[in-house]
Image: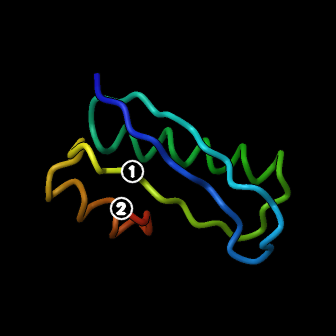
Amino acid sequence: MRKASIKISSRKISDIPTVERIIEFVTAEEFMDKADKAIEKACLSSGFVGVKCCVDNSGGVFNDDEVKMLEDDFFIVE
């Protein structure tokens, strides 16, 4: 089981705080599914209209192919 941290923030409203979540996953597809659910929940609870989601890959959790897949799905990999 791998873990990655995400930060979800509003693209349109700057004074709404960022929501941070730790996601446990096996595959990149599972990660994206769980991240999408976390984003949806953040939108409902925080009033986000448009969001950006940054994924912390500083520990090399994702390989190059997985990073490309995440970026193709509009995640910002840092």
Residue 38 sits in quarter: top right
Give the structural element (helix, strand or loop) at label 2. loop
Question: Which residue occupies 31% across, 50% down?
Answer: 57
Instruction: For marks 2 and 1, give the CA distance.
Output: 5 Å
Question: Which residue occupies 63% across, 50% down?
Answer: 39
Disc 2 designates what residue? 78
Question: Amino acid type of disc 1?
Answer: Asp
Disc 1 designates what residue? 56
Task: State which quarter of the image contains the C terminus.
Answer: bottom left
Toward the bottom, the furthest residue is 12
Question: Which residue occupies 80% across, 73% down?
Answer: 13
Location of residue 15 with respect to 31 vertically, above or below: below
| Other residues around mark 1 within 10 Å, as few (<14) / some (14–19) / many (≥20) | some
The answer to whether residue 19 is left or right of residue 46 is: left
Location of residue 71 with respect to 23 vertically, above or below: below
Give the structural element (helix, strand or loop) at label 1. loop
Q: Position of residue 41 (x, y in %)?
A: 72, 43
The answer to whether residue 46 is left or right of residue 4 is: right
Toward the left, the furthest residue is 64
Residue 24 sits in quarter: top left
Tell me, what colour scheme is on the image?
rainbow
The answer to whether residue 41 is left or right of residue 61 is: right
Asked if the residues shown at circle 2 and circle 1 are in contact, with their CB atoms under 8 angstroms apart, the answer is yes
Q: In front here: 68 or 59?
A: 59
Question: Amino acid type of disc 2?
Answer: Glu
User: Of callouts 2 and 1, which one flags the residue occurring earlier in the amino acid sequence?
Assistant: 1
Q: In front here: 73 or 53?
A: 53
Q: Position of residue 14 (x, y in %)?
A: 78, 72
